[in-house]
Image (cartoon, rainbow, N blue to C red):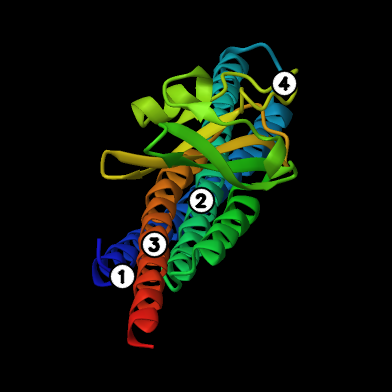
């Protein structure tokens, strides 16, 4: 996807979120008005009940009729109170959804900025550094490693890490263990439950294969998050997927550039020797 396409996509997403926010604001106002109307109705009913109660002075037909009316008003009051509860629950659910959408919007905006940083350089080491910053700041990972595929040996070799010594991380065969299987399938891996988890460099809590279309060039293995979570959210899943594509493209481009620069330097060295 070109930068122009990315800009159009981001603009489309931003407009979509804006429309959701506008509709949400209108819906919230409607809920508040309905809530206010129902509460006013309850107050009026309570006043009516009080007035009717004072009017009951005997057990004659009029008193029985008033008792019947009071019972009906009591039932209506309970129904309205039930409606108020439903409206308040809907309001709370909408507020929660609004927060989720706002978090997702912020996440996408931050990733959009980070993707520009990723694609703004062809320096391989700088790209790895930016990937580390994204994983720390956007995903909230405290301990993780970046492994890239050596296509000659079919091994995943550690090239960068955070919270772990890179030299301590193992080389992984494609298809072997959790990390190798994730790379082999090209699918993200998420641990079922993080309760009681203890770090095992062969068993991360998350694996994010770095893919260009269906070609996997590496993986990000996460072992610990700053914020303890019992499970991942839909925002997390979307972030992992978007990160995988951007990071893979940046890594691939910077490696190709570094290789070409190295070859060019070697050729230039031979030319210099021949022309002396």
Q: Is residue 119 left or right of residue 203?
A: left
Which residue was labeled with disc 2? 98
Question: What is the x, y in percent for residue 55?
Answer: 68, 29
Q: CA distance from mark 3 to mark 1?
A: 30 Å
| Picture quadrant where residue 75 is located | top right
- Front one among 80 and 147: 147
> Earlier along the polypeptide chain: callout 3 or callout 1?
1
Secondary structure of residue under mark 1: helix
Q: Nearer the viewer, mark 2 or mark 3?
A: 3
Q: Quadrant of the N terminus?
A: bottom left
Which residue was labeled with disc 3? 259
Q: CA distance from mark 2 to mark 4?
A: 32 Å
> Earlier along the polypeptide chain: callout 3 or callout 4?
4
Which residue was labeled with disc 1? 7
Residue ID at (51%, 56%): 107
Residues under numbered marks 1 and 2 in contact, where contact means CB atoms less than 8 Å apart: no
> Earlier along the polypeptide chain: callout 2 or callout 4?
2
Residue ID at (50%, 44%): 97
Q: Nearer the viewer, mark 2 or mark 4?
A: 4
Residue count near mark 3 (Cα–Cα under 10 Å), binned few <14, some 14–19, many ≥20: few
Residue count near mark 2 (Cα–Cα under 10 Å), binned few <14, some 14–19, many ≥20: some
> Earlier along the polypeptide chain: callout 1 or callout 4?
1
Residues under numbered marks 1 and 4 in contact, where contact means CB atoms less than 8 Å apart: no
Residues under numbered marks 3 and 4 in contact, where contact means CB atoms less than 8 Å apart: no
Q: Nearer the viewer, mark 1 or mark 2?
A: 1
């Amino acid at each position: 996807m070109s930068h122009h396409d990315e800009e159009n996509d981001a603009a489309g997403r931003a407009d979509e979120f804006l429309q959701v926010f506008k509709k949400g604001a209108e819906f919230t106002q409607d809920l508040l008005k309905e809530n206010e109307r129902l509460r006013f109705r309850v107050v009026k009913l309570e006043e009516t009940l009080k007035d009717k109660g004072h009017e009951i002075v005997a057990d004659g037909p009029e008193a029985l009729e008033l008792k019947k009316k009071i019972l009906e008003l009591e039932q209506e009051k309970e129904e309205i109170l039930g409606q108020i509860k439903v409206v308040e629950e809907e309001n709370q659910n909408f507020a929660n959804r609004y927060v989720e959408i706002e978090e997702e919007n912020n996440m996408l905006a931050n990733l959009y900025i980070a993707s520009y940083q990723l694609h703004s350089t062809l320096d391989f080491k700088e790209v790895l550094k930016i990937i580390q910053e994204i994983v720390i700041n956007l995903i909230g990972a405290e301990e993780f490693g970046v492994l890239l595929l050596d296509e000659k040996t079919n091994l995943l070799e550690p090239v960068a890490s955070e919270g772990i010594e890179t030299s301590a991380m193992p080389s992984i065969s494609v298809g072997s263990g959790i990390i190798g299987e994730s790379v082999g399938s090209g699918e993200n891996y998420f641990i079922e439950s993080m309760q009681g988890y203890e770090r095992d460099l062969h068993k991360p809590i998350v694996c994010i294969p770095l893919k260009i279309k269906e070609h996997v060039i590496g993986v990000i293995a996460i072992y610990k998050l700053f914020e303890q979570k019992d499970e991942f959210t839909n925002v997390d899943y979307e972030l992992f997927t978007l990160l995988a594509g951007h990071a893979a493209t940046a890594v691939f481009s910077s490696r190709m550039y570094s290789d070409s620069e190295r070859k060019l330097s070697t050729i230039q060295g031979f030319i210099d020797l021949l022309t002396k």
